Amino acid sequence: MVYSMINPRVLVLSSQPFNYLTGFGITASNLFKGWPVGRIACAYMQDIDPARDVCDKHYRVWKAGKASVGSKDHALGSIKRKFISMGFGNLVSFPVSREFKSWLIDFSPDILFCVPDSLPQIIFALKTAKISGAKVAVYMLDDWPERFKSANPVKRTFLSIVFNHYFMRLLRMSDLRLAIGSEMCNAYRRRYGLEFMPFQNCPDHELWTKFSGTEKVKGDPFRFVFTGAIYNPGNLQTLLRFSKALEIINNNGFNARLEIYVCADRIFGYKEIFSAYEHTVLFELVTEQDKIAMLYSGCDGLLLVLGFGKIDSLGEKYSMPTKLPAYMLSGTAILGIVPEDCALSRFILNNATGVLISKTDSIPELAQAIVEFCRGDALRKRVSLQAGLIAKERFSAEKVRIKFAKTITSVLERAYS
């Protein structure tokens, strides 16, 4: 599908390129799918190979090592790289090189689609907007600014003052502001006094329901699957507590296991961490979407986890997992081990799209709750069917993409009307 609207030239400015491994990469690939080739480009930061099926024009803004083949790049100075390695990344600004400036002018974007996840990236976006003269759209995927509160008082105060100055500059100059869900939009409206619109990942219905039509037969062992990044220590701790609970379950005669699928560069470290748990197995996450769809539909339970600590809640309270819509379309029941006071918990509870466990203090009680989920065949079938209905209603790829394209295009329509 190629949209019939004016299709502005959009430059996506983000940490990650278009790809099928990371949260933003997947979300962007789904939202922008169908945008005309040549009218979309991406300037990114991280050492990730871009997927080129949706966007074939990438520029890596800086590098610490070898750049991706086919992507232009600019080396970051050794002093700045040292600052980043020491944990002071928020004090480092990305350079606007002559090469990037030339590339930017050559592409001549109508809209700069900013997905900031750090203070340096905000500053870089402001510089890029000034050079290009493009209209600005801002898209927030999680509430990462709240994590400044976990720093020591001096650093927290400094970062908050500097961040608020630059972030408010970016928000005020923006012509469109988006966030990952309605709760984040509401929170940002209260906090910053500006309107935000919700847009979430919109996976293709045909792909993610391709393997969900067959009648499910409970596996032996009962297979739980978790895919994607383990964003912070809190999420890791929840997965570890789940693994401990599985050991109790198996010792009591119920056969169950957890399969964790992570990116290749992280699998070795996580294998060491989970090596004490016989019934937790690590695999490399593949990028082929049909293989992941088969994995989701072929297992017995899809696992969502968040951290339960105070620091964990700072950035995750209003976030929604990228994989949630695909989980919902798979025909497999979702088990969420998440705190009660968060957007994800309220979404699952209000829409009856999964089963929630909101406490992990007692490993034996957690084990019992997991067993009840495994044995509740009727419950799992009911919530998986409901999840599929809600996903088709709210995350329909075709509907969401058309609405997204109209929303992006409206920035120029308002400017020139």
Image: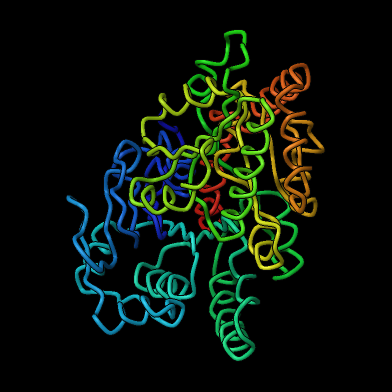
* Residue for point 56% across, 31% down: 257
x%, y% of residue 417? 55, 53
Q: Which residue appears at 55% of the width and 43% of the height?
A: 322
235 in relation to 291, above or below: below
Residue 174 percent across, percent down from the top left:
55, 65
The x, y position of residue 85, in whole percent, is 36, 76
Residue at 27%, 60% in the rendered image: 60
* Residue at 38%, 47% in the rendered image: 267
Looking at the picture, tell me which residue is in the foreground, 203 or 173: 203
Query: 412 or 297: nearer the eye?
Result: 297
Q: In this image, 234 relative to 293: left or right?
A: right
In the shown orientation, is residue 187 left or right of residue 125? right
Q: Quadrant of residue 346?
A: top right
Q: On the rendered structure, is 374 left or right of 13?
A: right
The scheme the figure's colours follow is rainbow
Picture layout, residue 278 above or below residue 237: above
